Amino acid sequence: MGIRTWSRSEVEHGRNILNSGLQGVRSGREAFLKGAPLSQFLAASTRSACPPAALGLFLGLLAGRSGKNKSLGRSLAFGLLGGAVGFGTAVAWKSRGLTTSAVRGAAHSIHVVRDERWMKKHFIAYA
């Protein structure tokens, strides 16, 4: 097998894996949402992330006021950072079920494609 044939085969296999992974993510997402729209789930996740974001903002403002440098800019920067960390963490925690389902679907689909390729390359004729 020449380098050109081999590289073409590898690129095609990479595309197959990528497409099957994306299809697995879609099927995992649909299995988790059970027909509900994704936007509705994301809206509920962001609404529930507001209290942790406010807590992070408050703690960031307090941290910005501590120490020698008690400038307003430092306090605001720490407050925004704390709010972003609180919001991001809360959204990630709320959507962990969706993420898990999507990753499982992708992994399953990718394994199927890899197994099919292995069987084509290592064909064993049973009599």
Image (cartoon, helix red, strand yellow):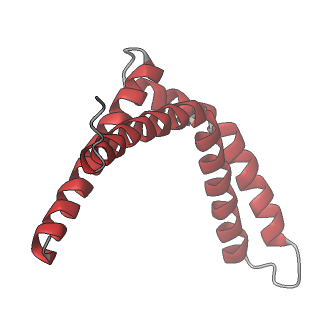
72 in relation to 14, above or below = below
Indicate the position of residue 85 as horizontal and vertical percent values: 65, 56
Residue 58 relative to residue 19: left or right = right
Indicate the position of residue 99 as horizontal and vertical percent values: 52, 38
Q: Which of 58/95 is in front? A: 95
Q: Residue furthest bottom?
A: 68
Indicate the position of residue 11 as horizontal and vertical percent values: 20, 62
Residue 98 relative to residue 74: left or right = left
Q: Residue at x 36, y 42 (%)?
A: 115
Q: Quadrant of residue 82?
A: bottom right
Residue 30 appears in the rendering: yes
Q: Residue furthest top?
A: 35
Q: Which of 38/31 is in front? A: 31
Q: Quadrant of residue 119?
A: top left
97 in relation to 114, above or below = above
Indicate the position of residue 94 as horizontal and vertical percent values: 61, 34
| Image quarter hosting the N terminus | bottom left
Q: Quadrant of residue 105?
A: top left
**How many circles with numbers are drawn on the protein?**
0
Q: Which of 103/39 is in front? A: 103
Residue 39 relative to residue 84: left or right = left
Q: Residue at x 26, y 57 (%)?
A: 14
